[in-house]
């Protein structure tokens, strides 16, 4: 079998790349280790930058997003019962949209299958070969038989635990990593949100975040120790802690049956460069940010926007200038997002530094209120710097 581009992983990065390439007449095969049902149900991110929303519209997959996505003007920052509204629309002219990652994935899968383009689920034993030559290959098992796909280029979009990044020979990749000693306990509940914007809450007990998925479904997160046992968090304890950490006078978090509960670790990670020979890494395969800045999904989409443009140019003109610059261009935004995600994480979580650290955090929160420049800086990073150019 043969394809111009072999794409490993059908997450937001792989599926968006596939659509961008097919639109330009470049054929690709997408290989995914999980079932379609699993990837469509995997609950993760929810916040889309305007760049991401614009790209999904441009690709013709924005119809349900336009109908069901919740467009927000900004966010609330809350500490000790006091709430600041950061009006991002006013400060930057740009909006953010709440739309579950699994909904994006469903829309992208449907668009690909509508095209009749190859997307294989439940593949196993995926391995990539000959990355330094002109004809890299992917071998895998699907439906009980072994396959080989010869390509011109391979896109490693297989997430943090995938096989592509580890296929790069030792010593050619520099990995930067910082693992936090806390994670996020996240829930989905059948409960009407009692807020119309997301609330990022600072509290002595730790961070809490109030988000949503629809007018009837709330998505909430609590900072917990990294090694926390979910069994220690029965529903009543979760609600009690959310009410405590997000408290404000005359207001409460809307409660309802919890139908999804899980703990995710927090990590900052960058692998440089994002290329080896004819292998190009994109999304979580190359970098992870802590979720406080809501950047992971948006960064994945930005990577493939850059990668698709470079691949299209290469196939059309034979010039590899775009591909040669891909890693540098993508990493500029990756590091910007690392810095912002780190800033939001340090601003809002219990970092174990006691009263001195709390004093610093409260001073920063107060500064955001007193200085429009500080609020604007947070806002322009949160909504996402414009996609123009390579930044
Ligand atoms: P993934 O979504 O991980 O997709 C990789 C795909 O590759 C998967 O489908 C996987 O099954 C497949 N795969 C793996 N190994 C193989 C293999 N060997 N062969 C074939 N296929 C393979 N980001 C935001 O922007 N905003 C947010 O609000 C946000 N909140 C988050 C909240 C939580 C709790 C978590 C966990 C993450 C959050 N993120 C957020 C991050 C975001 O979900 C990820 O950054 C995003 O999923 C990255 O997309 P991706 O396509 O690169 O990787
Ligand atoms: C959501 C997740 C985030 O990490 C974030 O910063 C904002 C919203 C969410 O899942 O809705």
Image: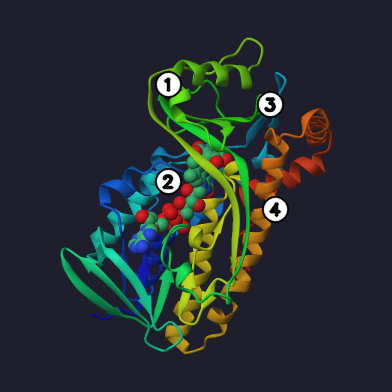
Q: Are marks 1 and 3 in contact (CB under 8 Å)?
A: no
Which badge, 3 or 4, is on the more N-terminal residue?
Answer: 3
The residue identified by callout 3 is: 78
Closer-to-camera residue (256/231): 231
Element type at marker 1? loop
Quarter occupied by residue 66: top left
Q: Quadrant of the N terminus?
A: bottom left
Query: Distance between the Cα atoms at labels 1 and 2?
Result: 20 Å
Mark 3 and mark 4: span between their CA atoms? 22 Å
Q: Which mark is residue 339?
A: 4
Q: Is mark 4 within 8 Å of ligand 2?
A: no
Which residue appears at 57% of the width and 50% of the height?
295
Give the foreground label among 4 and 1: 4
Q: Earlier in the sequence, mark 4 or mark 1?
A: 1
Mark 1 sits on what residue? 191
Q: Is mark 1 within 8 Å of ligand 2?
A: no
- Asked whether 191 or 267 is in front, the reply is 267
Q: Residue at x 27, y 70 (%)?
A: 140
Estimate the x, y position of residue 342 in percent, counting from the top left.
68, 48
Determine the residue positioned at 65% across, 48% down. Answer: 341
Q: Earlier in the sequence, mark 1 or mark 2?
A: 2
Q: Earlier in the sequence, mark 4 or mark 2?
A: 2
Task: Please state, as top left, top right, bottom left or bottom right, where the C terminus lies in the image.
Answer: bottom right
Separation of disc 1 and disc 3 at Cα? Answer: 21 Å
Secondary structure beneath label 3 = strand
Whether label 2 lies within 8 Å of ligand 1 gets the answer: yes
Circle on res. 234: none
Q: Which residue is mark 2?
A: 101
Question: How far apart are the two marked residues, 3 and 2, measured between alpha carbons?
Answer: 26 Å
């Amino acid at each position: 079998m043969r394809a111009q581009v072999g794409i490993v992983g059908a997450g937001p990065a792989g599926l968006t790349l596939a659509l961008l390439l097919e639109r330009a007449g470049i054929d690709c095969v997408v290989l995914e280790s999980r079932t379609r049902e699993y990837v469509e149900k995997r609950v993760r991110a929810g916040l889309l930058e305007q760049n991401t929303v614009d790209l999904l519209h441009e690709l013709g997959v924005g119809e349900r997003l336009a109908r069901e996505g919740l467009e927000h003007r900004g966010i609330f920052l809350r500490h000790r019962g006091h709430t600041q509204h950061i009006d991002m629309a006013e400060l930057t002219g740009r909006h953010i949209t709440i739309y579950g990652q699994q909904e994006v994935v469903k829309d992208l899968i449907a668009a690909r299958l509508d095209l009749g383009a190859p997307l294989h689920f439940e593949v196993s034993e995926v391995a990539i070969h000959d990355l330094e030559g002109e004809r890299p290959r992917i071998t895998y098992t699907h439906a009980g038989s072994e396959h080989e796909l010869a390509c011109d280029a391979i896109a490693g979009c297989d997430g943090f635990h995938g096989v592509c990044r580890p296929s790069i020979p030792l010593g050619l990749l520099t990995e930067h990593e910082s693992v936090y000693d806390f994670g996020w306990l996240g829930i989905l509940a059948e409960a009407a949100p009692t807020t119309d914007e997301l609330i990022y809450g600072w509290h002595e007990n730790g961070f809490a975040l109030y988000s949503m998925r629809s007018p009837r479904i709330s998505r909430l997160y609590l900072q917990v120790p990294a090694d926390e046992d979910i069994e220690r968090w029965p529903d009543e304890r979760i609600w009690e802690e959310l009410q405590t950490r997000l408290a404000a006078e005359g207001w409460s978090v809307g409660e309802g049956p919890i139908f999804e509960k899980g703990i995710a670790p927090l990590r900052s990670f960058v692998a440089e460069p994002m290329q080896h020979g004819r292998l190009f890494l994109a999304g979580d395969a190359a970098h992870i940010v802590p979720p406080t800045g809501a950047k992971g999904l948006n960064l994945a989409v930005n990577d493939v926007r850059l990668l698709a443009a470079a691949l299209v140019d290469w196939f059309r003109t034979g010039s590899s200038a775009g591909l040669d610059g891909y890693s540098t261009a993508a990493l500029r935004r990756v590091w910007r997002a690392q810095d912002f995600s780190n800033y939001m994480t340090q601003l809002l979580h219990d970092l174990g530094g006691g009263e001195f650290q709390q004093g610093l955090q409260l001073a920063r929160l107060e500064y955001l209120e007193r200085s429009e420049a500080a609020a604007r800086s947070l806002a322009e990073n949160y909504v996402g710097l414009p996609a123009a150019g390579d930044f």
